[in-house]
Image: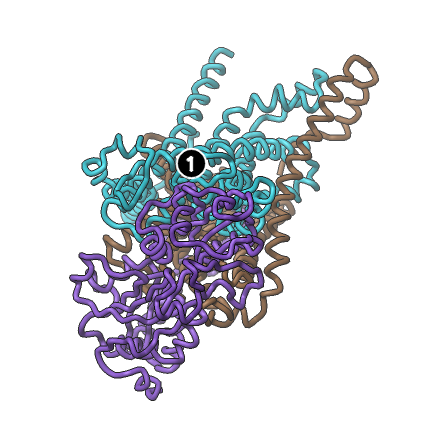
Chain colours: A brown, B purple, C cyan
Amino acid sequence: MSPVTPKTGMDVLREKKLARKGGLGREHAANKIALAILWLAAGITVAALAVILIYVIVRGIGVISPSFIFTWPHGVNSEGGIWPTIVSTLYCTLLSMLFTTPIAILAAVYLAEYAKQGRVVRIIRFAADSLASVPSIVMGLFGLTFFVEAMHIPMSMLSAAMALTLLMLPIVMRTTEEAIRAVPRYIRWGSYGLGATKWQTVSRVVLPTAMPRIITGLVLALGRAIGETAVVFYTMGLAINLPLLPTESGRSMAVHLYLMAVEGINLPAAYGTAFLLMVIILALNMGARWIAKRYHRRMETKK
Amino acid sequence: MHRIGTRSGTRPPFRPGTRLRALCHARHARLSPCVAAGLLVLILGASCVLVAGCSGDKRHVDSITVSGSTTILPIAEQAAEDFQKQHADTSILVSGMGSSAGIEAVGVTHTADIGTTSRELKDDETQLDLDMIPIANDGIAVIVHPDNPINGLSTNEIRQIFAGRITNWSQVGGADIPITLINRDEASGTRDAFATTIMQNAPFEIDAVVLPGTGQVREVVTRTPGAIGYISVGFVAPRFVDTPVKALIVDGIEPTEENIATGRYPLSRKLYFLMPKHPSILAEQYLQYVLSSEVQEGAVRDAGFLPVISGNLNLPTGSTSQSSGDK
Amino acid sequence: MSDSGNKTGKLVMVSRATQVKEAALATLFFICAFVAVLAVFLIFAFVAWKASPLFSQIGLWDFLTGTQWSVEDNIYGIVPFLLGSLIVTAGALIIGAPLAVLTSVFLSEIAKPRVRNIIRPAVELLAGIPSVVYGFFGVVVVAPLVARAGGGAGFGPLTGWIILSIMIVPTIATLSEDALKSIPMGIREASFAMGATQWQTIYKVVLPAAKIGIIDAVILGMGRAIGETMAVLMVVGNAPQLFAGINAPISTLTSQIVLGMSYSSGLHRTALFGMAAILFLISMALVLTVRLMARDQKRKTKKKDKRL
């Protein structure tokens, strides 16, 4: 990563010189105040995260136990565990990953390597951006009317996975395209120079090189899909069920948390669910970060 | 990984030689798309086999769908869970989408075997030719903050409050605190029952806070001194929470179990299962189980409701004792 | 951008079969890329189709300008929800946007790598927290605090603003940081060389240069705020009334759709889909705005380059 910040030591020197000259005291003070405000803003942002994290961890960690994770909820107020919701969540997000990955990567290959910049690409890009900004509730209603009502797929893992695919597609497309574009041009030249066709170049040189960043993007999108509520609410249903077939209904962790939070009779279970949900998503984020970092370091050492 | 790359590289023009590999920075991280595609096919294949295997197993499983009122959802879910434990190879899928959806599911679209409703049928719905079986009694408690000196209100006063005509507790003899109205969302069966019995379909004041769940209503009333809301009687003092709320005496009648069962308490209602005239055997068994004392004293009470008195039942066949002998 | 790929393909002798294969693959890729276009089209088509009875049965004008919403009386005017969405979004932007932009300036201009390596991941993690967790946090922590401070039950625009502004910070901050990073180092150095302080450089040189990118970031953050559903539903109080104070419950387009959907039928459902269609159009309009601004910017820089 290229150093973006100017050398701070130099800045300090320069400021001191200016201050000594006199007459610039006001600028100097303004500078100090402004910098303090910037520090404050960053501090508030981090504090917001810290407060939410700490709150959920403190209230949730006591609830977590092997039995909370691995047993079924029982009783009308969902005592016991949340195992079926964990399985449902992972089932449908992994299924949607299975749909998303090939489509998104090939689409990104098209945009980055094949397409001539022009009207068609502009339309595709605009569509991808629009898809990324479609509110999740609209996506949920679409999933309900299209997959469930029009295509007669029951509220199930499959419907939810397909709706989530639409959600993840633009994210993965974008990160993959960026990853492909970040592959140095000369690597391609080398491949072409050896007589490779375009697809050979893409499949054996460009994609493998870009793979760590592509995986990072996929993992981040997966995190987004796991936390999604509104879409899943209308396409997967609410039944507590351990899904085996993709056409079975279930209840995701996020939906379970929502129901626990509004019904609120059994708040400890809600805290526990929130905690686990956060842990899974944070783990995915950290994992993505780790992949990126490892890849980055290797790149550095190669140089 | 590398070997595969070389082998497939024997096709006409392309031979990934050493020079090319030297060019590739991230050689260590190479995951050939061929391998990736192979993996994908493998996963897909495996899941197909799995699915086929499972569907083979599932062929003998009897299955029914129960859907409808979110009020009844907890009872139906719990009963389904226990029922499935006692009867292997049965599957009872329970979902809560609201009473209207439940009535439609069992009566119109036939996507459910049993519909559940916490309200009486509307005119057009009575023509659907469904059996209506009460499975629990419910009383709605009007709740206020425990520090509120008011102990009871008349139906009329409650109506005036929720219609927005009484806006301060001093107007009904309480302290000088503005009333904070807590309402339920329109999908709620509890709101529906409250609207019919108390409001007599007069409009609710629209500046009331609308909350989508019983728990939230209770929680907000607990911490807001001027608040008034309504929840099922069983949730006034559930065992999960130690925060208190006060249930009001309505028209001089306390919301006790007896008063609700007899219907003397003004905010009483019944919860129903709706079934077609000729239900499947499994649906019938499930209903019997729900009416057994095991569920009535267990799940029904846990869910904040009261057991139905078995004498009032107009069951198509059998009695509750039969199903308990079953297991 | 002349990628040598296209030309190379023609230069090398390849067999007919390879050529056909290459063409087939290119077509496959195009189809995959076109899935996005198809999806957007389908989403709009289906939502609009479900909402279409609205024109004949409610009337577009009554729907858009009616201030009363009553399912019992079959009156569907969505002004309370339009206004509610607007108020909640505007407030969240007023709090969240400056916070996010300042954070991004801090990250790109001031923070030393060590500090940056703590704050940037924090911002990204903030983006990863599911909205239902934010909503839950709002219900159990923020709403009681707001209630204690302002009376009432603690549900309303104020609670919504607090939760939503935290939620949009990461969206805006990361995009705006990208914009700041794309400003060439030389501009800053020139400013320092002329004796400007760090703040003067940021305020008079860097921020104006990155203006368009930052505005884009804010617009996309706005899109996120308008479309946010679960968290908003849980904290705004959902009363279908016009704005009555920052502590009085209001309702938004998104929250009303969720509350109504589970039991809606007939005209009510049509109205809810109409609201979904409006949400869709708003989000499209925001993306389009960003697009047009970017194009405008490109044209301007081109002109400048020519003059030079």
Point out residue B291 in the picture as x, y percentages from the top left corner: 33, 77
Depth order, front residue of B218/B204: B204
Viewer can see residue C15: no
Viewer can see residue B305: yes
Q: Residue at x 41, y 68 (%)?
A: B305
The answer to whether residue B199 is left or right of residue A182 is left
Point out residue A280 in the picture as x, y percentages from the top left corner: 54, 58
Extreme residue toward the bottom, this view: B325
Depth order, front residue of B303/A9: B303
Point out residue C65 in the picture as x, y percentages from the top left corner: 31, 30
The answer to whether residue C272 is left or right of residue C114 is left
Neighbour tally class for label 1: few under 14, some 14-19, many 20 plus, Cα within 10 Å: many
Q: Residue at x 38, y 61 (%)?
A: A238
The residue marked by circle 1 belongs to what chain? C
Depth order, front residue of C233/A41: C233
Residue on which the image places disc 1: C84
> From the viewer's perspective, is residue A190 above or below residue B32?
above
As helix, strand or loop, the secondary structure at mark 1 comes to helix
> From the viewer's perspective, is residue A258 above or below residue A117?
below
The answer to whether residue C80 is left or right of residue A189 is left
Depth order, front residue of A211/C79: C79
Q: Amino acid under label 1? A: Gly
Check the picture and name the quadrant holding the N terminus of chain C: top left
Point out residue C146 in the picture as x, y percentages from the top left corner: 57, 43
> From the viewer's perspective, is residue A300 above or below residue B290?
above
Tell me how many marks there are: 1
Extreme residue toward the top, this view: C307
